[in-house]
Amino acid sequence: MRAQFGFGRGICRITAEPSVDFVSIYLAALQSGCPVVLEAQLDREDESKAGLPCLYELDRKSGRVVANEANKGHAFHTELKLLLSTSGSTGAKKFVRLSAENLTANSISIVQYLDIRPDDRAPTSLPLNYSYGLSILNSHLQAGASLLLIEEPVTSYALWEAFDKYACTSFSGVPQTFRILERSGQLFRERAALRYVTQAGGKLDAEEVKRWVAAGQRSGWDFLVMYGQTEASPRMSYLPANLSADNPSSIGVAIPNGKLWVSGPDEAPLPAGEEGELVYEGPNVMMGYATCIEDLAKPSGPQKLKTGDIGYFDEQGLFYITGRSARFLKLSGKRVSLDEVERWLRRQVVDCIAIGSDDALQILHTGERGVASSVAQWLSVPSPFIKELSVDTLPLNQNGKADLARAAELFEIHTSRQTPDGQQASDTGSGIDTIASIFRHQFPGSTVTADTTFDDLGGTSNDFVELEMALEEAGVAPFENWHLYPVSALSEKIPRHAITRSWLRPDHGAARALCCILVVLLHVVGGREGDGGLNLPAASNWHVLNDVLEPLRMPLFTFLSGYAFQVMKADGRTLRGHVSMLLNRLLAPTLFAISVFSIASNLVGTKFSLDTPVEFLSIFLFPYGVFWFVMALCLMTTVTYLIRRYFRGASAYILLGLAVALVIWQLNFQYNVWAINQSTKLMPFFIFGSFYASHADWLHARMGRIVALALTALVLSQLVEIGPSGSHGFSNFILSLSYIFLCVAFARHVPILSLIAPYTFFIYLWHVLAASGTRILWTGNFENVGLSIFAGTVAGVVLPILLFHVLAYLPFSAAYLRGK
């Protein structure tokens, strides 16, 4: 690795990511004496603003270092090792200069007070270009410990599966991380290897600290609050775990080999109980700042850092922060200078006043709307942290200076005039459009539809926090597992008065939920007399209803599965990723459900009993009960995946030809291996569902005409035979497709359907068991068929949802049992 730095000493610019390539190049650059610049993204514009010409850069595709010889020959201080962007204000971009001594001293101190051992293992739960995240890497390398290199949001099952699989001993997060985890309950579960949890990057409320300390005491791990700044490499203090419960508001004591005190106006140390500016001194204090290449040769400054925070210490020697000494905020863990924000905006020809708190930066300005998003992008903080108010004239006092009190008052008046939920932008248009636009803003370039969930887009922990805050701004209060809910369901959380809906606006979540209910209804009623369910007479009206719904039920389920396949861009996965998805999300939960169902069938003595090992093994080849659809779905998904991925230029024509062929020629194989007969009948609907997703916007704009066409086709399919002579399959296909488009078009935003939508697959797996159990309990006491069907249908929907949430709290890999 070091051989790649053959052009002498120069800046090495690396995109910080949790990968072996990054760690290797990072260490090789440090050992080669090349100052490292860590970036979240490679951005040439940033480089030009920074004025720091980089000799080396990591090429992410090849994993090798590439050199730009034009940037050779610059002078650097001999001790300079690392350049970190300051966590907020970056007019002419400012870097913190850190030396080898800074990094080593801080790492040794962290290893000492956290007692990091060689057998410890920590996940990369924070960005590695963030000083807190990088300190986890440095301290564990210092101790000879291990790291789990993973880039998954804290809401991801994959993160916690890996966390448990590799027996991680610690976890680190910022305040937003712990608020997310408190709702999901992940850290409250038993994890035998976990020794401690650390929090920094902003203040966690005292009550929240108490809850986490208590959770740790119950589960056998410590919760430590820490305090630091990038300028201190970054750690300055920590609150010992044994003092946390009684002193939840404290930032603790200085780290080993460091000194913390409270400074008065004359910079003399103040006694206990008196407020002043917190000052830190230690070998981990930065060399100084850099705004240009010449600054990198400057000598190191004093090992003393004025933090800008006001606080005091008590008789125990514990320190507390009570405010800021200057116009600084800490937004999303980033320190931001209000004065520098104002200077930056003035350079953009925007006159303004910047005020606020750690909750939000408020900008009063005389420009056009859009200032907030520009500032958020410049500061690299979530946009919900930035508020703006455009006025004709800025408030000034009699001396001509900014009237900060009046500016705050104007913001307060502006806020009070908003709707109770802060909804101004949602007064017109669809709630789905509102939520979808929030998703698109967070995930630019991604396809976002009414069925899209946060998990579908594969967001990071930072994405989760930012999107949750943006949703809250739109009136969607945070709730458990919101990241599993589609856009359509989230739109239902917006206050009704704020939304004017357009007619015929498809809600695919509602359609999927309705389809799921129809499947449950089918199996509650059962087949004709003697064929399961309630064993109703063959002439029962309930059988007539099921017959009428037959052309819609499974074709619609399949159509929506094809739609989801396309929306999730499943063909973009590698073959290994596709197989992994089938195994983890479809087959594993299905095998679990089949096992439970077969055991129950054996106990009760139904036709689904598996009496011999051969019968049990046969379920891996042939359809078993209602679970045939999962086999069919695997086949349809795989065929579509292979065609989409390996015949990209002609995939649409191949799929369309396949769909038409299967509609006209009804195939019927002697051996129905993996439900191939059902697959060939349903495959055209899967293909058309994927086509529908690809052209959704175009179709939605013409939904009125599509409804008219579907109604016409529906009538014609009943009056005349459509398609080639003797091809009943074509007429049946047109009938089903007409049903599907009518159902999708008229599927309304019914809250109960939106709540059911995220669980449809799990309901499909478990509804028969739930409904059958209810029927057995019900039938002996009540004769009313309508009530029996209602009770069975409700049980078939509600009980699987309850089971879904129960499985989430199991100590083993519940994600494999729940699927998606």
Image (spheres, grey):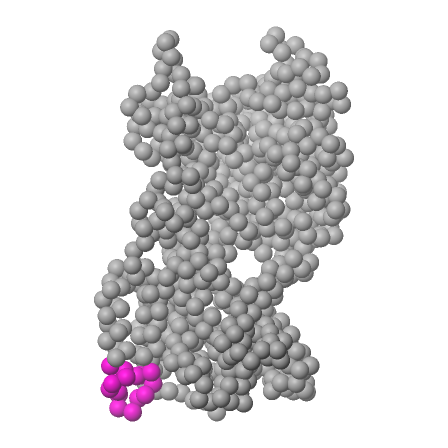
Using the rendered image of the protein, determine whether residue 264 is visible from the camera's viewpoint.
Answer: yes
Residue 143: percent from left, percent from top:
72, 40
Q: Is residue 64 above or below residue 294?
A: below
* Residue at screen point 50% across, 27% down: 357
Q: Quadrant of residue 724?
A: bottom left
Q: Which residue is drawn at 58% across and 38% down?
A: 175
x, y (%) of residue 140? 68, 41
Q: Residue sitting at 63 percent across and 51 percent down?
A: 186
Magenta stretch, residue numbers: 716-732
Q: How many marks?
A: 0
Query: Residue 536, how many percent across, how many down?
Result: 51, 86
Q: Is residue 572 visible?
A: no
Q: Is residue 30 above or below residue 643?
A: above
* Viewer-proximal residue among 416 and 53: 416
Q: Note whether 544 is above or below 592 in the view shown.
A: below
The quarter in which the N terminus is drawn is top right
For the point 58% across and 33% down, the residue is 202
Examine the rendered structure and indicate whether residue 291 appears above or below residue 501: above
Q: Nearer the viewer, residue 320 or 494?
A: 494
- Is residue 653 inside the magenta stretch? no
Tell me: 248 left or right of 537. Answer: right
Horizontal and vertical percent position of residue 534 = 54, 82
Q: Quadrant of residue 729?
A: bottom left
208 or 27, which lies in front?
208
- The image quadrant of residue 540 is bottom left
